[in-house]
Image (spheres, coloured by chain):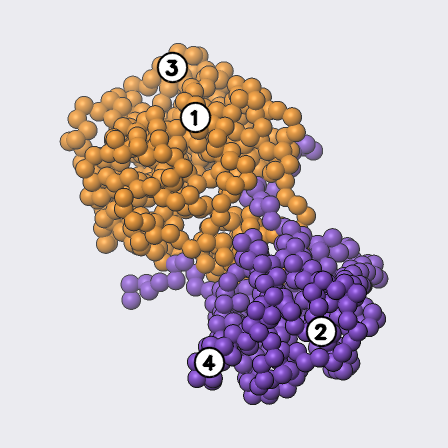
Chain colours: A orange, B purple
Amino acid sequence: MATTQAFSGGIHPHEIGNGKASTCAAPIVNAAAPAKVTIALSQHAGAPAKCCVKVGDTVNLGQVIGEAQGFISAPVHASVSGKVIAVTTCTVAAGRAVPAVVIENDYEDRWDESVRPCENVDALTPEEIVSIARNAGIVGLGGAAFPTFVKLDTSKLDPKPDTLVVNGAECEPYLTSDDRLMIESAAQIIDGIRIAMKATGVKLAKIGIEDNKPEAISALKAAATEGIEVVALPVMYPQGGEKMLIYALTGRKVPNGALPSAVKCVVLNVSTCAALSAAVREGKPLVERVVTFAGRVANPCNFRVRIGTNLMDLVDQAGGLTEGVRKLVIGGPMMGMSVPSLNLPITKNFGGFLAFGDEGLSDEESPCIRCGRCIRTCPMGLMPAKIDAMVRHDDYDGAIALGAMNCMECGACTYACPAKRQLTQSCRVAKAIARSKKS
Amino acid sequence: MSKYVVSSSPHLRDNVSTRSIMQDVCIAMLPACAAGVLFFGYRAAVILALSVAAAVLSEWFYCKAAHQKVSVGDFSAVVTGMLLAMNLPSTAPYWMPIIGSVIAILLCKMIFGGIGQNFINPALAARAILALSWATVMTSFAPAQFGNLAGVDAIASATPISGASKETFTLLQLFLGDCPGTIGETSKIALLIGAAYLLWKKVISWHIPAAFLGSFAVCYLLATGFDVNVTLYQLLSGGLILGAFFMATDYSSSPATNKGKIVFGLGCGLLLFVFRYCKKTPAEWCSYAILLMNVASPLIERVTGVKSFGEVKKNA
């Protein structure tokens, strides 16, 4: 086994109720397609897509309904076939209202004629792969939803990347969608990795997986081909953080304020690689994804869902919420967002749904006792309590001077704080204010 | 209004709380307190009880008077009360722990803003004030008598360090606590059991105690021409073990960074060496070494700092 570089800091949130146990053993289930989908036109990092259908139009499955605008953007596709019944706005998990297209499902699942399998994948040039990824609306499925084609296009990079870092760590507690996908679709993930290697021109890919997923590790090891290494990583949150993962697999540290390309790495999530394979080999745009439903739901599971399905529909399919739900979390428990209602459409960056009771509620804040736990846990080597103190005194410049901009908002400090202080939130405030001052 | 709570992430919290940490410290001090009672008799128990009660009550009164949320539930006042009592001789009059605790809580902790804001260790500061005000009382110790709960009337017997050049106790006596001294400082084995508990529960880290004891021992070895016996005698004498594990590690008055902790511990060890080796007076210098370093702690923290993950050379 390759040696890995452990970042300093980190926490073991799995010790607080191992939420993965409820969903990691059962296969992914295809959720029933809904009667209508609400597809947000802004569900990726970058400029929103521009609506290119109108009410009354009949659309096919996989047809473009929103065209990418600007360089960093991604097109949006119909996830069912049927009739456009509204062009409106919807509220997404982040709380923003964004333009959206509502399609009534005719249940024919009529694929659009643009969806065609590729005859000879091996003959594709890097440029062609980048273009397919762009047209298929592939974005990072790990959570940030950054358009994947931008990462794959290495033509303008200098120096050229030499390593593809594939994120199968899934370090967030409760979430198991990547774990299941690695077990069930190992070959597709490896295929996607090979395609990404070709597009980026790198000769080496390393898949990092936390060693609490032995089945996924052996499945990918069995499927891996030449130039692809599967590396078991110690369980330590946030092992799946981009910079932590690059360090673990390559020993390189991404400088503050820089991107992975600065250390000649391209980082993709395992589920993004699977989507890339489907796009290139089968011509399928990104119209579905796997979402973990866990916590206080009657039947915790992993659903493969159509983009645009209402969350309420899916919670019903999972047997509904059980008693005592106090908080609804979209994404993982460490970095996910809590939302006030189940009335939300699934978007491309929707990693999981967790219904929490008291465990999701935080105790009242008390004064900092200077124990230093936040400093010891911070994977970025910051002093969260000091940043917090600065922010609470409105000294944002002081907070920035302490490196608040380097905070990746992993939540480890807040998790570890015995005084239950909202340290991560203070870093967010500092970052937001610094950005608003800049613009 | 939604019935669901909306808040920022993370949505999971560790079980460790301020209260659980302070309770762990109390648990860790219990063996040494028990040893104090066993060696010095019931007076030790009364002094412990009075000190804790006075500490908790004065914090309660302060919070009430200042119209603040009452903070005694975090157990930090209990810790201060216990620590102060451990630093008093069993022969101290009963008013002494009460005055000491009031000083510690009101003067050294609450007026600076309460928990986390005190720049010196409250129990140590109170001890120092008591020692300066009632020097004779603070340096009169009863001889240790294991199991004699009635205790022995105050006899000004020599403590291990006041004997200075002349060794009067065996190392085993010092280790078990069969020697005169304050209530909580004599039984090194009991203190080390508590220290092991704190390290295991990750309430304290090894940095400060290791740097403190290590630098002190190295200095003594060098100064005495590698006389291991004398060095061990010094390590096991007076309040050094109690100070290194239970007082120098006070969160508020020591640096929060690992590098800072090491510098802080080194400073404590060097100062104590200088005081003990050069002064050769009967006073217990350990608390003064820690108090001096307490004051230097913010400066140490500022100059040591931390290195961020991505702080690397940028291609240049």
Please determine whether, in this image, residue A84 is positioned above or below residue A402.
above
Residue A272 or residue A84, whichever sits in front: A272
Q: Which residue lies at the image location 24% right of the left edge and 34% below the top edge? A: A224
Query: Mark 2 highlights which residue?
Result: B143
Label 1 SS: loop
Going by the image, does B58 lie left or right of A285?
Answer: right
Instruction: Measure the alpha-carbon separation of dots 1 and 3.
Output: 30 Å
Q: Are marks 4 and 3 on the same chain?
A: no
Q: Which residue is mark 3?
A: A109
- Give the CA distance from mark 2 to mark 3: 92 Å
Q: Nearer the viewer, residue A136 or A359?
A: A359
Q: Quadrant of residue A29?
A: top left
Which residue does the numbered mark 4 point to in the structure image?
Answer: B227
Q: For the residue carrying disc 4, how many other residues have a C-alpha within 10 Å: few (<14), some (14-19), or many (20+)? A: few
Residue type at mark 1? Ala
The image's mark for residue A25 is: 1
Q: Nearer the viewer, mark 2 or mark 4?
A: 2
Residue that appears at 65% across and 26% down: A323
Asked if residue A288 lies left or right of residue A422, the reply is left
Q: Chain of mark 2?
A: B
